[in-house]
Image (cartoon, helix red, strand yellow):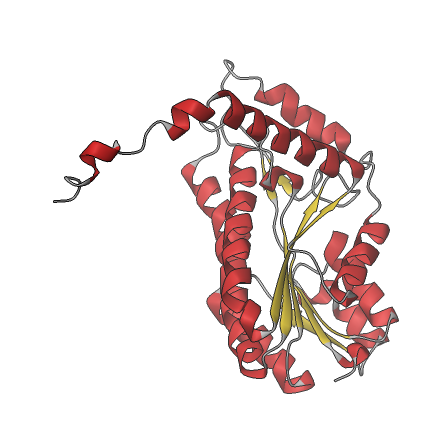
Amino acid sequence: MSEKNKVWFITGSSTGFGRELAEQCLERGYKVVATARRIEDVQDLEEKYPESALAAQLDVTKDEEVKNSVAKATEKFGTVDILVNNAGYGLGGGIEEPSMDQIRHQYETNVFGVIRVMREVLPMMREKKSGHIVNLSSVVGIKAFASTGYYSSTKFALESLSEALSQEVEHLGIKVTLVEPGGFRTDFAGRSFTQPENRIEDYITSERIDAIGEYHNNQPGDPVKGAKAMIDMVEAENPPLRLPLGEDAVTAIDEKLEAVRQDINEWREVAIDTKVDEEQADGVGG
């Protein structure tokens, strides 16, 4: 199969990175399954590219819609070659502030939604011994910040799931990449960001959440360039496991890695001095 005959399946294609990816892939000649919770939000892509685009309704929290959308993709195009798990949203607030229902829905969308789609697509990738899964993580999937702990934790979950999966499927010819954007001018800080149901004055979450709102449409990253970088990465012969996007993401991740290294170095002797003494080793587990 030539590169341009490959089929992209993109979740959350109505706006932001998902929309940009869908449009640029179609312009490059790829086949694209553009999914959204409201099919009318992506119907125009199918109308413009009737032979190479398929609009599909998909709420990643619903098992049946996941199965149906993948089935429609294979019915029209025969397979899925590149899966992009882009659908998701942010939840603000300190650890005490969002309701349990808000927290559950955050995980249901950002984590279990990704798992549902991957598990539906992986069997066909395993069968043909090829494919590429691209999971949209975030800079906060590496470095957490106050007031977005739950959102950040969903991205930390994707980091570990994707890293493990990459080791499980490498010998099958399937590639896995985590994309870790910093601030881009998508809807994340706007309609895709949910406020906590509760506010606690002891915390500084209100000012941090307000700052996120003010950040909307002022982020340094261009989604058009970000989408192009993702497509170029998929087209590369040896795509990376992790692709940070944006100078802010690269800087923050460098800072996190340095902080981890500093903790390890300062406490190295304490950490290492926990092994069983040699003279006691014979009695361990006996």
- Number of labels in the image equals 0
Front residue (pair 160, 87): 160
Q: In this view, does 27 lie to the left or right of 53?
A: right
Give the percent coordinates (x, y) of residue 24. 84, 64
> In the current view of this chain or complex, which residue is farthest to the left?
286
Front residue (pair 173, 96): 173
Query: Does residue 75 lie above or below 217 as drawn?
Result: below
Q: Quadrant of residue 8?
A: bottom right
Residue shown at 73%/45% (left/top)? 187
Residue shown at 49%/71% (left/top)? 64
Q: Is residue 65 left or right of residue 26?
A: left
Q: Quadrant of residue 66?
A: bottom right
Give the percent coordinates (x, y) of residue 107. 48, 48
Q: Quadrant of residue 36?
A: bottom right
Q: Quadrant of the N terminus?
A: bottom right
Front residue (pair 158, 208): 158
Does residue 34 appear in this view? yes
Give the percent coordinates (x, y) of residue 37. 62, 61
Query: Does residue 190 lie above or below 122 as drawn?
Result: above
Does residue 147 appear in this view? no
Residue shown at 62%/38% (left/top)? 140
Query: Does residue 138 lie above or below 197 as drawn?
Result: below
> In the current view of this chain or complex, which residue is farthest to the right?
27
Give the percent coordinates (x, y) of residue 228. 83, 57
Front residue (pair 249, 262): 262
Query: Does residue 173 lie above or below 183 as drawn?
Result: below
